Image (cartoon, rainbow, N blue to C red):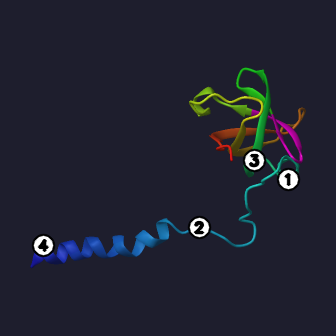
Amino acid sequence: MNRLLAIALIAAPLAVLSPQASAQYTGPGAGTAASTVADARAQRDDHPVVLRGTLVAKLGKERYQFRDASGQIEVEIDDEDLPPQAIGADTVVELHGKVDTHRFKPTDIDVDRVIVVPAR
């Protein structure tokens, strides 16, 4: 009987707290990820972005020029975040990351994940 009571006392708080662990704030200020280069340039530092377009040039170590229909922006992609397949200047990719604003240089994007979009 004591074991059953102990198990019930341990399980009850866990059951109550579990749904709260996956809840997310969706009210004002939650914002959505910017989806174009033009939108990303207008955002504050660390704002999430999901961009779809092409990497048109490699500018240096882990730095690339990205282009979509609204413009171009420099992106930083760590080597370990690149997918295993080759990416050319005409390969459509989806970049997941965040806006990185600077005081004395242009805004760029810090990319966390690169997905190659399958050709249609």
Q: Position of residue 119 (x, y in %)?
A: 68, 43
Residue 74 among those drawn in magenta: yes
* Camera-nearest residue between 67 and 31: 67
Identified at 64% across, 29% down, the residue is 78
Query: Where does the magenta region start and end?
Result: 66-75
Q: Position of residue 96 (x, y in %)?
A: 67, 46
Q: Which of marks 2 and 4 precedes in the sequence? A: 4
Which label is found at residue 3?
A: 4
* Residue receiving disc 1: 39
Mark 4–mark 1 distance (CA, rounded to whole Å): 58 Å
Identified at 71% across, 65% down, the residue is 30
Counting other residues with Cα less than 10 Å from the Cα at mark 3, is it few (<14), some (14-19), or many (20 or more)? many
* Residue receiving disc 3: 51
* Residue receiving disc 2: 24
Q: Place residue 109 in its image quadrant.
A: top right
Q: Position of residue 63 (x, y in %)?
A: 75, 27
Mark 4–mark 2 distance (CA, rounded to whole Å): 35 Å
Q: Which of marks 1 and 4 precedes in the sequence? A: 4
Counting other residues with Cα less than 10 Å from the Cα at mark 2, is it few (<14), some (14-19), or many (20 or more)? few
As displayed, is residue 111 above or below residue 17? above
User: What amino acid is found at the position of numbered circle 2 in the picture?
Assistant: Gln
Mark 1–mark 2 distance (CA, rounded to whole Å): 23 Å
Secondary structure under badge 3? strand
Secondary structure under badge 1? helix
Residue 46 appears in view: no
As displayed, is residue 48 above or below residue 86? below
User: What amino acid is found at the position of numbered circle 4 in the picture?
Assistant: Arg
Q: Which of marks 4 and 3 precedes in the sequence? A: 4
Nearest to the eye among marks 2 and 3: give it. 3
Q: Which of marks 2 and 1 precedes in the sequence? A: 2
